[in-house]
Image (cartoon, coloured by chain):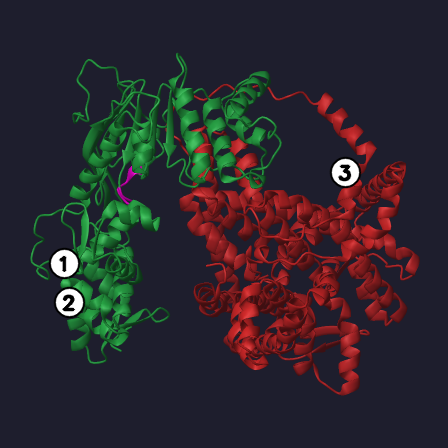
Chain colours: A green, B red
């Protein structure tokens, strides 16, 4: 499976394209948060493109920029080779949260978007009827969304998108809030509709964090990296359709993606000297880190990261954050795809609870942020610091991080080791 | 009135008075003789038409500043109808104001910065603050007919209704979930479609609950709005409020009792025939999937929906009104929230508003300059006295309503019986009970200094009770079970579960009650009773007497001080408490 360039060679027709797009969101303190950096991506006719990446890599933002819902901070958005101004006219959009109007019936939800297009009442009715039938909702025309299960709701979402007969179908984590079995059938149905000749949508762009789903559905897989979101690599998936989840080729591709992701998310090169610079804190709770250690301890101290994900039912992006946090604290090591308990990690998990706290504290104080805050606390006469002081320290030294979230993790870890106490009402950190 | 917008919607208790009526009407329903329903509706329609004609005659009639009030009981229904129509007219005005003002504030980022603080100030100005300007202006505009005076009365009721509805609508518009907005933007919903299929439905529930509150708040000053003295001029419009005023002045006990009964009947009828059906209907705009376990019902809504006449009429209407012609699809373009003409209109309106505010501020300062320093210090002292009374009334009210509200809210049986009663009592305008209360206070030898606290309580404690009940019903069953399993004692249960759990509701109740108490100080520190005027030292008494003797500069000074006190207190105390309540004690987080 060759790696394909993100930009097509010039003679291929392109429906929609991003060129060197950056996106920043303003933050209250410090510099704006960069969520996307130098994204170049094109959507060609007759393909399914999947954007895959950990949470916080800006997948949904890319989709919204392509749709014209959000404007990029820098860079170009092209639609049929012309700059896109305003909304993308050729798309249907399926939302993760369904985004159905709860006060409208199935029919009314679909008709609302058709009426907005200015179609005649007859046309509206015909198209609505056809779309409802297409997704297998006949008989549910007069039901309200609250009467439907998650899977049925997403069918309404899809009927709404299909009714517009869109050139491209954009789907933002369409099946993540749908039960597993229904998701299975929805995937197949979407592919059936897309696969039939001379019919819209010609192309599908979907956002997902489910590796198997992506391999099952996509022709091209855009693998994204987090903070800020960048295109890591683009994978061509030439497996013939219909695809079989158990075929060796498919499993091989899944395996390759696993390697790519672990290489990206759990890099093997030696980390820089701890405490020398400020390390970003992965958003994982202390109890999740302890849970990971317990898990490893009961399995001989090591396990494949994807096995852990499927064993615990954790979303992969979340598990990555936990593994990275544990690695940052020197509690685990990650050669290739394995997660291996380190000596301090083993000591910590086997220690009695009071000893646990002091061991945890030792690990925390190897990190620069904790060192700085702890020293300031110690120096203060009342051993008391304002939340704002810490927020500023984070914003100043980790400009590309979301400082509110980093602060939450900071407090969570610090409290767990009783390194300090935090009072939410007075927003003050104190020594215990 | 300093009422809290939108907060109630989460836990507003559903009335169960419905069931009683429901049972009675089920007989009719079961017989399937729907002709009765239709006859009933027809009679209602006839009554409505008669009422409108009656009202039109009154409005366009010759100018009579102070009409003679007929104190016979037979005259009561007519007067009640006139008051009702004024209340409804004021409500329609409030609704129109809410839609325009709330929409503008939510959609125009620049105007919002002026509109919302302005609304905050407006809601802290008591009704009497608007009276002189409104009355003199409108009477001057229509010197020969009753229209000016009627409009003035309607606008005074409006000032007791509009603000919390506007806040609710504004907050709803600002909190529409992002994905629902995105669907509208992506599919290029036009202004009208966006309003009718996204914005209004999403705001509906909050708007309906606040409408009920507003209607109740509007009645509070009914007596003042229909019968008032401005300097040497005595204004009186025919209506339930003025009927009560005259009955009090003449000491006619039978007429007073009649007016109270008529008021109660009017409130119950409004609740059953208007609000209950609207509330039940508005449940279709709920956002959450689950929540309410018991579906609310309205016998009147069922009745209307079963009517053959109505079905016929609506099908006729559908045939007569043609389908709207399809719009031309808009061309692709930036999803502008405001297209050019709209933003121009908005800008012009905004500048006009700024000019109006500037002009108002300048003329207020000019007016206030004429107030001698001694009066200012007097007003300051009185303001502190009234503040003390307001706080005392809030504390006293809480002392009994907290345990009572918990007892009612925690017992499904009690809340089923008492909740609708509390709702009616809360909507009843307390000033109508003042004469009786004053008589009792006099017999006990209590002066108006303390007595006015009791009078304030009469009007405002219900808001606290109402909210505590709502809070108590919303305590999750698992938390209550946990206190039982771990054998927490009564006091510990109260301190550790019930009080924290109802605290957010309590704060809402306090804000509403304190706002109401400030307003009530105007009528409770200065009471006319059997032809004489009782008063005590206080800001409310100062406002009443200044209005009565047409000392407009003093009136403006007192009102400004009151509005400032209310606004400052809201910001410094209630808002902080609210933040604490949301952060620490909210059960929905």
Front residue of this view, candidates B128 and B66: B128
How far across and down, in percent of the image, does residue B69 sit?
Answer: 86, 59
Chain designation of label 1: A
In the rendered structure, which disc, 1 or 2, sits on the residue that comes first in sequence? 1
Q: Nearer the viewer, residue B523 or B381?
A: B523
- Chain designation of label 2: A
Q: Which residues are magenta?
A: A54-59
Tag 2, which secondary structure? helix
**Does the magenta portion include A356?**
no
- Residue A235, position in %: x, y? 21, 29
Is residue B343 visible in the rendered image? The answer is no
Relative placement, left or right, of B49 versus B541 is right
Q: Nearer the viewer, residue A246 or B447?
A: A246
Disc ID at residue A278? 1
Look at 49% across and 66% down and name the residue there.
Answer: B570
Q: Residue A338 vs residue A291: left or right?
A: left
**Dot 2 corresponds to which residue?**
A372
How many angstroms separate mark 1 from mark 3 (CA)?
Answer: 68 Å
Spatial separation of the CA atoms under disc 1 and disc 2: 9 Å
Quadrant housing residue A199? top left
Give SS at disc 3.
helix
Measured along the vertical axis of the image, is residue A385 above or below residue A268?
A: below
The answer to the question of whether label 1 and label 2 lie on touching residues, with beta carbons closer than 8 A, is: yes
């Amino acid at each position: 499976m060759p790696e394909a360039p993100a930009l097509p060679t010039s003679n291929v027709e392109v429906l929609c394209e991003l060129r060197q797009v950056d996106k920043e969101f303003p933050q209250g303190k410090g510099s704006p948060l960069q969520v996307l950096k130098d994204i170049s991506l094109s959507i060609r006719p007759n393909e399914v493109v999947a954007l895959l990446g950990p949470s916080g890599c800006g997948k949904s933002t890319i989709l919204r920029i392509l749709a014209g819902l959000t404007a990029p901070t820098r860079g170009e958005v092209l639609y049929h080779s012309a700059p896109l101004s305003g909304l993308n006219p050729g798309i249907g959009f399926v939302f993760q949260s369904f985004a159905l109007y709860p006060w409208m019936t199935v029919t009314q939800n679909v008709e609302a978007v058709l009426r907005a297009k200015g179609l005649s009442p007859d046309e509206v009715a015909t198209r609505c009827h056809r779309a409802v039938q297409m997704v297998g909702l006949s008989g549910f025309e007069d039901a309200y969304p609250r009467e439907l299960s998650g899977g049925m709701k997403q069918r309404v979402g899809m009927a709404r998108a299909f009714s517009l007969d869109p050139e491209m179908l954009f789907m933002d984590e369409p099946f993540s809030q749908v039960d597993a079995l229904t998701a299975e059938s929805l995937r197949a149905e979407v592919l059936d509709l897309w696969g039939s000749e001379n019919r819209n949508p010609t192309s599908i762009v979907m956002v997902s964090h489910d590796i198997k789903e992506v391999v099952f559905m996509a022709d091209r897989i855009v693998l994204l990296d987090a903070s800020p979101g960048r295109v890591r690599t683009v994978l061509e998936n030439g497996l013939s359709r219909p695809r079989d989840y158990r075929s060796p080729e498919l499993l091989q591709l899944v395996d390759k993606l696993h390697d790519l992701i672990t290489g990206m998310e759990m890099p093997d090169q030696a980390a820089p000297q701890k405490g020398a610079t400020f390390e970003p804190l992965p958003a994982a709770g202390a109890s999740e880190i302890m849970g990971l250690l317990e898990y490893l301890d009961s399995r001989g101290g090591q396990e494949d990261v994807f096995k852990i994900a499927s064993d615990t039912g954790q979303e992969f992006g979340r598990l990555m954050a936990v593994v990275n946090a544990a690695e940052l604290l020197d509690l685990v090591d990650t050669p290739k795809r394995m997660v291996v308990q380190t000596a301090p990690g083993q000591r910590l998990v086997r220690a009695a609870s009071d000893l646990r706290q002091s061991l945890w504290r030792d690990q925390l104080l190897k990190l620069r942020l904790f060192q700085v805050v702890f020293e300031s606390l110690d120096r203060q006469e009342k051993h008391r610091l304002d939340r704002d002081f810490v927020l500023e320290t984070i914003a100043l030294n980790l400009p590309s991080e979301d400082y509110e979230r980093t602060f939450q993790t900071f407090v969570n870890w610090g409290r767990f080791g009783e390194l300090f106490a935090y009072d939410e009402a007075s927003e003050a950190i104190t020594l215990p | 009135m300093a009422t809290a917008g939108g907060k109630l919607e989460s836990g507003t208790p559903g009335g169960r008075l419905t069931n009683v009526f429901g049972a009675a009407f089920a007989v009719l329903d079961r017989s399937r003789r729907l002709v009765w329903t239709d006859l009933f509706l027809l009679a209602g329609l006839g009554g409505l038409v008669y009422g409108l004609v009656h009202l039109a005659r009154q409005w366009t009639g010759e100018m009579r500043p102070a009409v003679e009030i007929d104190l016979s009981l037979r005259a009561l229904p007519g007067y009640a109808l006139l008051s009702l129509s004024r209340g409804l007219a004021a409500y329609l005005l409030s609704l129109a104001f809410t839609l325009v003002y709330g929409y503008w504030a939510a959609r125009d980022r620049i105007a919002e910065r002026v509109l919302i603080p302005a609304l905050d100030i407006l809601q802290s100005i008591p009704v009497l603050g608007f009276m002189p300007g409104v009355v003199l202006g409108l009477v001057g505009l229509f010197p020969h007919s009753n229209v000016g005076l009627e409009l003035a009365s309607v606008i005074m009721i409006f000032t007791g209704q509009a603000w919390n509805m506007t806040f609710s609508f504004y907050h709803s518009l600002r909190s529409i979930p992002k994905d629902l907005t995105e669907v509208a933007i992506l599919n290029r919903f036009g202004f009208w479609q966006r309003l009718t299929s996204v914005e209004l439905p999403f705001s509906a529930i909050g708007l309906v609950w606040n409408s009920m509150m507003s209607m109740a708040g509007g009645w509070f000053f009914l007596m003042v709005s229909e019968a008032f003295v401005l300097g040497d001029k005595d204004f009186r419009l025919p209506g339930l409020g003025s009927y009560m005023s005259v009955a009090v002045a003449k000491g006619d006990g039978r007429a007073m009792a009649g007016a109270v009964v008529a008021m109660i009947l009017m409130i119950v009828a409004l609740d059953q025939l208007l609000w209950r059906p609207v509330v039940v209907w508005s449940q279709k705009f709920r956002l959450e999937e689950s929540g309410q376990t018991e579906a609310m019902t309205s016998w009147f809504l069922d009745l209307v929906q079963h009517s053959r006449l109505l079905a016929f009429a609506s099908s006729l209407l559908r045939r007569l009104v043609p389908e709207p012609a399809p719009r031309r699809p808009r061309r692709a373009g930036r999803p502008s929230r405001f297209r050019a003409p709209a933003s121009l209109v908005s800008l012009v309106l905004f500048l006009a508003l700024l000019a109006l505010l500037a002009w108002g501020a300048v003329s207020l300062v000019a007016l206030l300059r004429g107030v001698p320093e001694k009066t200012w210090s007097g007003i300051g002292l009185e303001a502190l006295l009234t503040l003390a009374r307001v706080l005392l009334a809030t504390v006293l009210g809480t002392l009994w309503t907290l345990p009572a509200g918990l007892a009612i809210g925690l017992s499904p049986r009690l809340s089923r019986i008492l909740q609708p009663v509390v709702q009616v009592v809360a909507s009843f305008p307390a000033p109508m009970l003042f004469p009786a209360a004053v008589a009792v206070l006099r017999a006990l030898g209590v002066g108006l200094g303390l007595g006015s606290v009791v009078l304030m309580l009469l009007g405002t404690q219900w808001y606290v009770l109402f909210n505590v009940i709502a809070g108590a019903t919303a305590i999750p069953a698992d938390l209550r079970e946990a206190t039982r399993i771990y054998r927490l004692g009564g006091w510990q249960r109260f301190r550790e579960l019930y009080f924290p759990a109802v605290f957010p509701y309590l704060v809402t109740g306090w804000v509403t009650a304190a706002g109401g108490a400030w307003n009530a100080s105007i009528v409770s520190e200065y009471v006319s009773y059997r032809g004489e005027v009782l008063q005590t030292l206080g800001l409310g008494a100062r406002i009443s007497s200044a209005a009565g003797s047409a000392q407009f500069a003093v009136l403006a000074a007192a009102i400004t001080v009151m509005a400032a006190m209310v606004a400052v207190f809201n910001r410094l105390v209630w808002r902080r408490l609210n933040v604490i309540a949301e952060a620490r004690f909210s059960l929905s987080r």
